Image (spheres, rainbow, N blue to C red):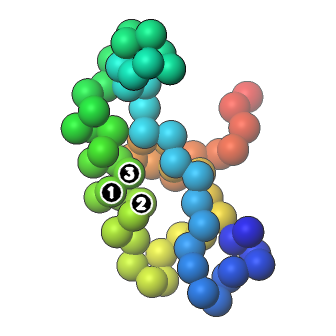
Amino acid sequence: MARKFQNNILVNAVHPGYVPTVMTSRTGIHTVEEAANTVVIRVALLPDDGPSGVYFNKMEIAPFTYT
């Protein structure tokens, strides 16, 4: 999608961290506020010329695969 819309919008993947939610059986280690900061401050508010087609793991751009 990032290639298809490269002139219109930014397309990225975001992992906000291990947050206590129903999905994690409330066992996460990061607060909801910390996760929201990752998504909103680091990714949703990227400038128009920000990165596209990348994966954010918490606050950092990370590889899509782990070795």
User: On the image, numbered disc 3 is attached to which residue?
Assistant: 39
In the rendered image, residue 38, in percent from the top left (x then y), is placed at 35, 47
Left or right of 13 on screen, residue 15: left
> Decide: marks 2, 1 in contact (CB < 8 A)?
yes
Between the C-alphas of marks 3 and 1, the distance is: 4 Å
Name the residue rendered at 44%, 10% in the picture.
25
Q: Relative to 28, say whether 51 is above or below.
A: below
Quadrant of the snapshot with the C terminus? top right
Quadrant into which the N terminus falls: bottom right
For the question of whether residue 4 can be seen, the reply is yes
Identify the residue at image location x=56%, y=73%: 10
- Which of the pair 60/52 is nearer the observer? 52
**Three-letter amino acid code at disc 2?**
Val
Task: Give the residue number, with chain letter if any, for mark 1.
Answer: 40
User: Disc 2 vs disc 3: Cβ atoms closer than 8 Å?
Assistant: yes
Q: Nearer the viewer, residue 1 or 21?
A: 21
Q: Position of residue 13 (x, y in %)?
A: 58, 52
Q: Find residue 16 and report its image quarter.
A: top left
